[in-house]
Amino acid sequence: APSLTYPAVKVTNLSRVKTGQPITFNYPDASSPAILVKLGRPAIGGVGRERDIVAFSALCTHMGCPVQYEKGRFLCRCHYSMFDPAKAGQTYQGLASSWLPQIPLRIDGKGDIYAVAVQGLIWGRVKNV
Ligand code: FES
């Protein structure tokens, strides 16, 4: 398979991240909404001292409706799919069969948090970049 070249895009700074308060951004481009959240519990791929800061595509893998972070998981209100942000976006309820694409993060020495890739195909696209 061809290798993909993802941009590194600054999302926010650690000082602005509060547990349970999602931050929206776009990645890898303006047409792709995404959500960063500090879960308050360790997560697969989580960054930060508690390994609990993660980011995901905000487009449900079923039909592309926006997902919301609520009560510790991502919920799609169109057909009530739910995704576990601590388990790499695993779908555990509803019509979506694909996991929610996770966006790996990196933190630099100043606490700036960058999105650096996408794991899985963002809904509605033939390729992520
Ligand atoms: Fe999200 Fe159908 S679009 S469950």
Image (tube, helix red, strand yellow):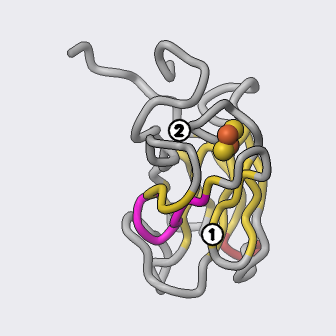
User: Residue 73, which numbered label?
Assistant: 1
Q: Residue 68 at x, y = what percent?
A: 76, 58
Q: Residue 13 at x, y = what percent?
A: 70, 65
Q: Is residue 59 visible?
A: no
Front one among 71 and 97: 97
Q: Secondary structure at mark 1?
A: strand
Above or below, 15 against 33 in this view is: below
Q: If the image is split into quadrants, where does the N terminus sit?
A: top left
Q: Quadrant of residue 73?
A: bottom right
Q: Secondary structure at mark 2?
A: loop
Q: Is residue 53 visible?
A: yes
Q: Is residue 37 magenta?
A: no
Q: Which region shows up in magenta?
A: 82-89
The residue drawn where x is 59% and y is 36% is 62
The residue drawn where x is 55% and y is 47% is 115
| Comes first in the chain, label 1 or label 2 | 2
Q: Nearer the viewer, mark 1 or mark 2?
A: 1
In the rendered image, which residue does mark 2 sit on? 8
Which amino acid, by three-letter code, is at mark 2?
Ala
Report the image quarter containing ligand 1: top right
Above or below, 54 against 8 in this view is: below
Q: Is residue 86 magenta?
A: yes
Which amino acid, by three-letter code, is at mark 1?
Arg
Q: Quadrant of residue 83?
A: bottom right
Front one among 90 and 106: 90
The residue drawn where x is 66% and y is 67% is 37
Q: Quadrant of residue 38?
A: bottom right
Above or below, 49 against 6 in this view is: below
Is 110 on the left-hand or right-hand side of 91?
A: right
